[in-house]
Image (spheres, helix red, strand yellow):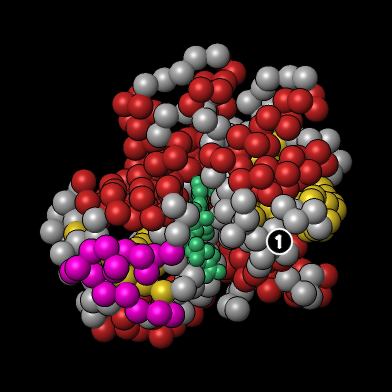
């Protein structure tokens, strides 16, 4: 970790000491602190106001038991989390993840990243994240419903439309949000916009399901255009085959690219003719099946078990599965194969050494908190629609989403330049996202 400001370096050591079992959280803080060195150098007032020290400590962390009964009548127990990280610029906002790998470190890294991402959207949303180590794979609809109801029975005490507004993330889509919304309404006897990503018939926003993937492509398009390139006729590889990956693939194809590979946690498919997204949607959104099914149904496709998707030759790589999925050797393979741009749909999918390698080899790099902010931005638009009790058309939401992503690119690029790191969007996104929250924290005093 290269943190050349003494104050930040000492503080980072302190954060490491206090959170020894949280590698993902420390990775996220380390990357942000590296970027903030020129800010700490220029802004002693923010050091005096304790902003750096305060921003790495969640305002509140809630950990709770989630017990539920499976289809065989057996009692199951999972651990639930909600980290309410920062409310300086708005109610806590961020997704819920259901995956066996969920622990405090993962939720804290996601919540920390969310502070800066939400700030970049320019909408009034603080940072939070939650979830559980519950594994939705192989569970019946009834089991999913009972888990979601039990999870919400505790979570409901801590959230609210003006307090904390959760949404989806890995393992949480419209089905889970529906069950949780129903339980919240029942407990509170209140119909409010307490969750986003809701179904259209009960307050959801058009384009929210597509928003993260579409936004990722709008951001990438802007980044390419500023470097005299575009999606047109480019070969694209996308990891994952969930919500973000599917709608990134859809928009990339609409913008003239050919998506040739997608994956899940078992392996990846390569289709030289271009991925047929209708088949992927049928397997993943309807059947909740595995990506190898694709190769059984599409003759031009080949399935490979395990890692290795980044060895496929491409112009644009969009990691859209999970954290730390793109390693140094993957970055080396991408560069050797002539990649021109990598933009992160997932949160923190590239390891720090992979990011450094890509940037030092002239690859355009769009960091997660800027590139995937379209999902939460559209959640912010869902909150606005709920507040005014109106629904906007898909054209209207899509246009706003596009405007927000263009703005994020420009603000990140501008901040990087102003702080002496022209072209470094990692630094620019961290600085631009941080400054707005820091000013608000300073203005609001030091009571918490
Ligand atoms: P989904 O649950 O819809 O899809 C997740 C995809 O990633 C699946 O293909 C899954 O494969 C794969 N995946 C998950 N965990 C792992 C793992 N440990 N190893 C390998 N593959 C894995 O989630 P989303 O598409 O919503 O989320 C994907 C990423 O995007 C996450 O990092 C999330 O935080 C981020 N994100 C999501 C937003 C949203 O609005 N949904 C907004 C911004 C970021 P499998 O089915 O085999 O598990
Ligand atoms: O990581 C993210 O930004 C999300 N999972 C979306 C959060 C949201 O509140 O829409």
**Residue 46 visible in this rendered orientation of the protein:** no
Disc 1 residue crowd, few under 14, some 14–19, many 20+, Cα 10 Å = some
Residue 72 at what x, y percent from top left? 75, 56
359 relative to 246, above or below: below
Please, what secondary structure does the residue beneath circle 1 have? loop
Q: Residue at x 54, y 44 (%)?
A: 173
Residue linked to disc 1: 133
Drawn side of residue 430 relative to residue 30, left or right: left
Drawn side of residue 11 relative to residue 276, left or right: right
Residue 239 at what x, y percent from top left? 39, 65
Is residue 304 a member of the stretch shown in magenta?
yes
273 relative to 256, above or below: below
1 relative to 92, above or below: below
Q: Residue at x 32, y 75 (%)?
A: 303
Q: Residue at x 15, y 54 (%)?
A: 232
**Residue 4 visible in this rendered orientation of the protein:** yes
Q: Relative to the observer, which residue lies in front, 131 or 351?
A: 131
Q: Quadrant of the C terminus?
A: top right
Residue 235 at what x, y percent from top left? 20, 65
Q: Residue at x 83, y 41 (%)?
A: 154
Is residue 142 a member of the stretch shown in magenta?
no
Determine the image quadrant of residue 260. Answer: bottom left
Determine the image quadrant of residue 335. Answer: bottom left
Drawn side of residue 28 relative to residue 147, left or right: left
């Amino acid at each position: 970790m290269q943190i050349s400001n003494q104050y930040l370096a000492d503080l980072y050591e302190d954060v490491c000491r206090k959170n020894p079992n949280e590698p993902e959280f420390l990775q996220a803080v380390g990357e942000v602190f590296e970027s903030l060195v020129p800010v700490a150098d220029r802004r002693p007032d923010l050091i005096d106001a304790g902003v750096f020290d305060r921003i790495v400590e969640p305002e509140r962390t809630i950990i709770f038991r989630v017990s539920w009964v499976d289809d065989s009548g057996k009692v199951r127990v999972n651990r639930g989390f909600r980290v309410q990280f920062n409310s300086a610029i708005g109610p806590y906002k961020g997704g819920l993840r259901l995956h066996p790998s969920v622990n405090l470190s993962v939720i804290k890294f996601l919540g920390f990243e969310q502070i800066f991402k939400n700030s970049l959207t320019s909408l009034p949303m603080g940072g939070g994240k939650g979830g559980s180590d519950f594994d939705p794979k192989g569970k019946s609809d009834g089991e999913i419903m009972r888990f979601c109801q039990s999870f919400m029975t505790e979570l409901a005490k801590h959230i609210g439309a003006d307090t904390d507004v959760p949404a989806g993330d890995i393992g949480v889509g419209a089905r889970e949000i529906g069950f949780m919304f129903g339980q919240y309404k029942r407990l509170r006897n209140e119909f409010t916009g307490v969750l986003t990503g809701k179904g259209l018939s009960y307050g959801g926003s058009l384009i929210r399901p597509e928003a993260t993937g579409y936004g990722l492509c709008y951001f990438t398009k802007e980044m390419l255009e500023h470097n005299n390139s575009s999606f047109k006729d480019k070969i694209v590889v996308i990891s994952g085959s969930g919500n973000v990956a599917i709608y990134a693939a859809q928009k990339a194809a609409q913008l003239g690219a050919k998506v040739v590979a997608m994956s899940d946690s078992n392996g990846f498919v390569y289709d030289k003719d271009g991925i047929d997204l209708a088949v992927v949607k049928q397997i993943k959104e309807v059947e909740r099946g595995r990506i190898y099914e694709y190769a059984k149904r599409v003759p031009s496709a080949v399935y490979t078990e395990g890692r290795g998707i980044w060895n496929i030759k491409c112009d644009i790589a969009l990691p859209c599965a999970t954290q730390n999925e793109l390693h140094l050797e993957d970055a080396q393979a991408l560069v050797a194969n002539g990649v021109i741009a990598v933009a992160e749909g997932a949160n923190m999918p590239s390891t720090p050494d992979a990011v450094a390698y890509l940037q030092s080899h002239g690859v355009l790099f769009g960091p997660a908190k800027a590139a995937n902010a379209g999902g939460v931005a559209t959640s912010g638009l869902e909150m606005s629609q709920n507040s005014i009790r109106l629904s906007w058309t898909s054209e209207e939401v899509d246009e706003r989403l596009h405007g927000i992503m263009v703005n994020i690119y420009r603000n990140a690029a501008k901040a990087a330049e102003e702080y002496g790191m022209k072209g470094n969007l990692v630094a620019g996104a961290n600085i631009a996202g941080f400054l707005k929250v820091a000013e608000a924290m300073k203005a609001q005093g030091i009571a918490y």
